[in-house]
Image: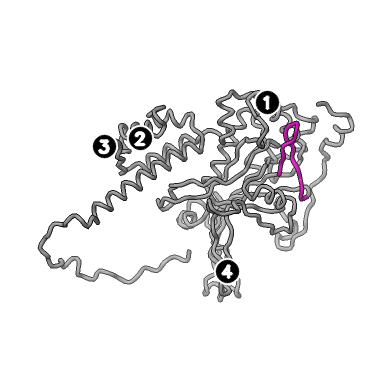
Amino acid sequence: MTMTPLEHELLAPIAIPEYQRLDPYAGGIADEATRVVPLAMISAGYRSPGQDGHRGLPRATRPEDERQIHLHEAMGPTPGIREILERNNYAFLTIAFPLDDPRAFISQVFTRYSSTRLEAYGDANSITYVDARRQTLEANNGQPLHRVFPSGSPEYERLVRTCKADTRIHFCLAEWTEGGSRVVFPDGLGIYAIRTTSRHSVRNILGTIAYTAQFTRGRIAGLPFQLRIVHRQNVSGPDGTMRQIPVWSIVTTPPSGVSLSSRTFREVATAALREGAQLMLPAPSTPTLQELESDGPVEVEVDEPNEEQMLALEAGGRADQAHWTRTWHAMARGVTWEHDGRAYDLASDNGRAAFIHQHTQARTGSLSAFLQTATEEQAAELIAALGQARTQMMARRYGEIFDTDREAPSRPASPPSDETTEDTSGPPEESPAF
C-alpha cells in the first residue's frame, strides 16, 4: 500500500527540542526521562476485603474463580477495557504490543513490600533500602532514610534475595476484523499494562514473542495475541515447595470460526505489522516510531511458517529447553517412580528414559528430543507429571512409616546423652536492619 505525499509529510518526524521541566527537588531542571503512564493495569490476583480496619491480604487467581483477570483503574475509569473484559467473562483479552523491542515495553524493578509500605526497591545496579526504624525516624525528623547499596556489595546480595521482580508488560488492545486485525483505543490513545511478579509469566511471554518474531524478521508491533491466564500445577517455588500458580500466556489464536493456517498467517501478519508500525506511541530511552517511519510505511517481510510451526504458534511457542532441562534435573533428584511393578530412579538415564517414554505414549524417551519440539505448555505438563511422581513417592513412604498394621520393632530405652541434654543455646544474634 503506497502513501500520498500528504501522508508522508504528516508522518515525517518533526525536530522538536525536548521540553525542560523545572523541578526544585532536582536542583533546577528535571533530568527525569519521559514516561508513559498506563491507563489501567491488569493482574492475576487481587486484594481480599479487609476486616476490623485492617487491609485484606493479596490473593492469587484460582481456577475456580469467575474472574481470572482483574482490572485496576488507578488512573481513573477505563470503561472501554472493562466492557471488553465483561464481554469475555474476564477470561481473556486480544492484545498487541506497541513496539518491536521487548526492552521498550517491558520494565522490571526489584521491590519488597511489607503489609503497609515499600521497604526496598532497585535494579541490577543498586538497591535502595527505606530505613524507617524508630531510631532512624527520631534522628531524622520523622523521615525515613533511603540507603543505597551498589550491586556486588554484601547488603545488595542480602536484600535482592528478599525482593521480587516487579514487572510491567505494556500492551494495546486489538480486535479481529474480516480482513485480519486492527489495534483499537476504546479508552483514548494510550496503553495498558500487565503487572506481575511471576518469573514463569515473564519467561512464557518472552518465549512466545521470540518464537513469533522468527517469522516476522523481528517485528511484532501490532500483531494480535490472545492473552489469558493458565494454571500450572506442581510448580516449584523459591523454597522448593510445590504449588499451583496462575501464569500469563499469549498465543496466536484467532476467534472461533476464523481459520488461521500457515497459508494465511503471512497475509494476516503483514497487514497487522503495517498498522503496528504507524502506532507512533512513545517509549522511554528507545527510538520512537516516528524516527522509524521517516521514509514512510515499512514494507514488512513475513516468513510463512509450515503447519508444524503454525501449531506451535497457536500453542504459545517452543519451550525454553535450557530452563526445562535444569528444572527436570533439579526436581528428579531423589525421586523413585514405580511403574509396571518396577522402581525407577528418575535421576538416572534409564529412569528418565522410561518415564518420558511413558509420558509421551512411546513417542520418545529422550528429554532433549522431547523439548526440541515441545511447547511451553507441554514442557510444563511433563514437569507436573514429575511432581506427581514425587508426591506419590512421598505418600508411599508416609504409609510405610505410619502403617498401623505393622508392628514396630521394640528396642530398649536408653538415657539421653549429655550432648543432647546440655543447654548450648546462647544469646540470639542481633539481626540486621533489613
Tell me if mark 4 has few (under 14), some (14-19) or many (20+) residues whose alpha carbon lies within 10 angstroms of its own: few
Place of residue 262 in the rendered image (x, y in percent of width and height, measured from the top left): 63, 25
Label located before the other in sequence (1 or 4): 4
Q: Earlier in the sequence, mark 2 or mark 3?
A: 3
Q: Secondary structure at mark 2?
A: helix
The amino acid type, in three-letter code, at marker 2 is Phe
- Per the model, the C-alpha gap separating discs 4 and 2 is 47 Å
Disc 1 element: helix
> Which residue was labeled with disc 1?
264
| Residue at image point 22% right, 57% down | 404
Give the magenta-colored segment's residue range: 173-187
Q: CA distance from mark 1 to mark 4?
A: 51 Å
Instruction: Specify the label residue 341 is tagged with.
Output: 3
Q: CA distance from mark 3 to mark 1?
A: 50 Å
The answer to whether 219 is drawn above or below residue 388 in the figure is above
Task: Tell me, yes or no, whether the two marked residues, 3 and 1, touch with CB atoms within 8 Å.
Answer: no
Who comes first in sequence, dot 4 or dot 3? 4
Mark 3, mark 1: which one is toward the viewer? 3
For label 4, the residue is 50
**Image location (x, y in percent) of residue 311:** 57, 30
Q: Give the residue type at disc 3.
A: Gly
Are discs 2 and 1 less than 8 Å apart at CB? Answer: no
* Viewer-side residue, 32 vs 121: 121
Q: Are marks 1 and 4 in contact (CB under 8 Å)?
A: no
Numbered disc 4: secondary structure: loop
Q: CA distance from mark 4 to mark 3?
A: 52 Å
Q: Which numbered disc flags the more N-terminal residue, 2 or 1?
A: 1
